[in-house]
Amino acid sequence: MTHSQSNILTFGDAEEKDRRGQLFDLFKNCPIPADEIFLNLGLFLTPQTLSRILFIDFLYRQILEVQGIVIEFGCRWGQNLALFSALRGIYEPFNRLRKVVGFDTFEGFFKTSEKDGNKVGPGMYSVTPAYDGYLQRLMDLQEKESPLAHLRKHAIVKGDATVRIKEYLERNPETVVALAYFDLDLFEPTRDCLLAIKDRLTPGSILGFDELNDPVTPGETAAFKEVFGFHRWGIRRYRYNSRTSYVVFDRS
Ligand SMILES: C[S@@+](CC[C@H](N)C(=O)[O-])C[C@H]1O[C@@H](n2cnc3c(N)ncnc32)[C@H](O)[C@@H]1O
């Protein structure tokens, strides 16, 4: 495990790093004309990146008959938000109530606790300045590719998610949570956000997790254990992706 240039944890070996560098060079110098490049993005997917996209699709398909919104806690560059939004366009283009809401500091971790182990620290997973504005513009445009484009069905909420989620739920008291994806990596914010949405889950709601059972970021598991315990629901995995898990909220 190493810290990459942009201060994230990576797990590949030197050969993989070299291969990814070569792939990036091919991407940067891609000869495909601009008006065809988005049609061919699959050229640059690796099994790992594709399996994450498949996982997001898998989660989304499970909430098609569950009322409520989709939340990502810890959206960072926002790929999952864009995927959720595109999946809404595919599977339920007229579901105007299926909002997609992303929370992030957009400044990375600002504090860690002893339950988070010694591999993570403040400042990790930061993004470039004013990235939330860029993501907002991107999501606005992306939403226009699907029906009901005149209704804004997404929100990007900047700041400490533990504070912002409570404000969001006060402003939107009707909120039911159909799917919440947790990728905050850390104990305290994961625990507090789980507690904040607990009363908004309904049987069939899905909770997705990026790091359960991962010794590198033990805080996420500790938070899940503290709020829900291990025995109530099965912690399942999507067989094509190694690190992620999900639980189906059944009853409290
Ligand atoms: C591993 S990254 C998320 C990656 C992203 N979900 C993806 O799939 O690419 C973890 C994110 O959690 C965010 N984060 C951690 N603690 C937070 C908090 N208290 N409030 C808001 N965001 C937080 C960080 O800023 C960081 O962007």
Image: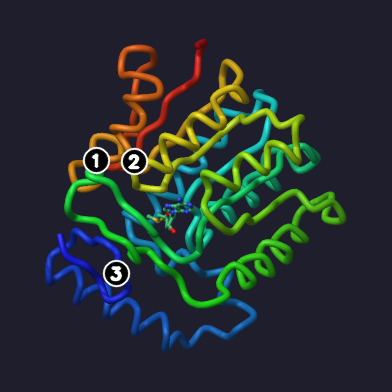
Left or right side of 50 for 134: right
Please state which of residues 195 and 210 is positioned toward the viewer in this rendering: 195
Which is nearer the N-term, disc 3 or disc 2?
Answer: 3
Q: Residue at x 27, y 42 (%)?
A: 242
Dot placed on the residue nearer the N-terminal end, 2 or 1: 1
Residue nearer the viewer, 177 or 166:
166
Q: Position of residue 119 (x, y in %)?
A: 19, 55
Q: Give residue 7's mark.
A: 3
Gap in angstroms between the C-alphas marked 3 and 2:
19 Å
In contact (CB < 8 Å): disc 2 and disc 1: yes
The image shows residue 177 at horizontal and vertical percentages of: 62, 30
Q: Residue 111 placed where, x, y %?
A: 35, 55
Q: Residues within 10 Å of mark 1 (few under 14, many from 20)?
A: some
On residue 115, the disc is 1
Distance of label 3 from label 1 (alpha carbons) = 20 Å
Q: Which is more N-terminal, label 1 or label 3?
A: 3
Numbered disc 3: secondary structure: loop
- Which is more toward the observer, 184 or 96? 184
Residue at 73% x, 63% y is 140
Whereabouts is ligand 1, in terms of quadrant? bottom left
Given residues 93 and 66, the one toward you in this image is 66
Q: Tell me the kind of residue under disc 1.
A: Lys
Give the vertical position of 125 relative to 134 (above or below): above
Q: Report helix, strand or loop for mark 2.
A: helix
Where is mark 2, residue-wise?
Answer: 187
